[in-house]
Image (tube, grey):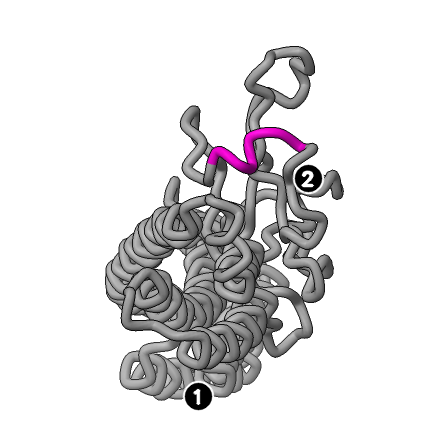
Amino acid sequence: MRVSTSMIFQSGLQNLQRQQSEMLRAQTDIATGVKLRSADDDPVAFSRVSQLSSQQERVEQFLRNNDLADGKIRSQETRLAASTDILQRVREISLETGSILQDATSRKALSNELSQLREALTEQINARDERGEYVFAGTRANSQPFDEKTGQDQFVAGAAPTAEVKVDVGENQQVTTQRVATDIFTVTPGDENIYPSDLQTNSSLPAEFPFDPTYDITNVDLADDEADPRSALQIIDGLKWAIDNHDAIESSGADVTEFYSASQQDVDVLLEQVVVARGEMGNDLNILDRMKSDQGAWKLANEQVVSGLRDTDMAEAITRLNENHYNLQATQKSMVKIQGLSLFNNI
């Protein structure tokens, strides 16, 4: 095989450029701390890193959702805990008012206490979060759940429908971050009317009574065959009305204790609904704790795998840089020697 002078120089130049390129790559790996910068560096590793990075972003979003959900749920649970104490006291008052030991002065004191309890409960169920959104308004976060004056449930009263807000905190795993006040603080009457028979028809319903507990016992008006839903605030108002009108109700021949008993039953339903809601919140918080732990461990393991594929091994890169430096020097000296060679030296 004949080797021309131009081939010798071309081969030497290519070798020199390759050594310079390898040295530059090692320097870049050390300077940036990243050895996998494009798919042509290592197609298999680059594809794996891209897949893991995509999963990492999704897990990080789950963790952000987790933190958001945890704050919202704990805020609601705090409100429900306070509401439980208030409703327990309302229940105690409904029992105390039926005692024969209560006189007008005592009943007046209980009535005043109910007013304070109603105000405190209103603050809890119409509470807002740090963003100014109503805690128990579901998807209609800017709508006040209950009318403070009448106690009317605004979502039951024909407003636009609302629903619970759920967020993803894991693959196929959701928790409820905003519940609907209606499900917790409003009683939906059953088939049996628990309020006194004097209120069985609209005509006998006192104008000042805070809600309509009547049933259409004649079945004349099929649209009014059940009593209307009544909120916690209206139930307290009803109990207060019965206490304030205790003597008048007894004078009419009606059994006033039926009012107190009905209020107690309604409060019992409310307390049960609050307990159920708090139980669901406890389950959601357990889910959040478990998901946060699992995802945190996965994130750490994932970061280690990605780092191994993408990040520079400094010891290896420095060794490679030194090797490339020596190879480059050797190549340069070889080129000098080759340039000095000539056939005329042998003539």
Q: Position of residue 267 (x, y in %)?
A: 39, 54
Q: Position of residue 246 (x, y in %)?
A: 49, 61
Identify which amino acid the numbered label 2 is placed on.
Pro
- Visible residue check, residue 104: yes
- Magenta: main secondary structure equals helix
Residue density around tag 2, few if under 14, some if 14–19, many if 20 or more, within 10 Å: few
Q: Secondary structure at mark 1?
A: helix
Residue 184, above or below 17: above
Residue 169, above or below 213: below
Q: Residue at x 44, y 50 (%)?
A: 259
Q: Secondary structure at mark 2?
A: loop
- Pointer 1: what residue? 329
- Mark 2 or mark 1: whose residue is earlier in sequence: 2
- Pointer 2: what residue? 161
Identify which amino acid the numbered label 1 is placed on.
Gln
Give the camera-side residue of 156 and 265.
Answer: 265
Q: Residue at x 33, y 60 (%)?
A: 98
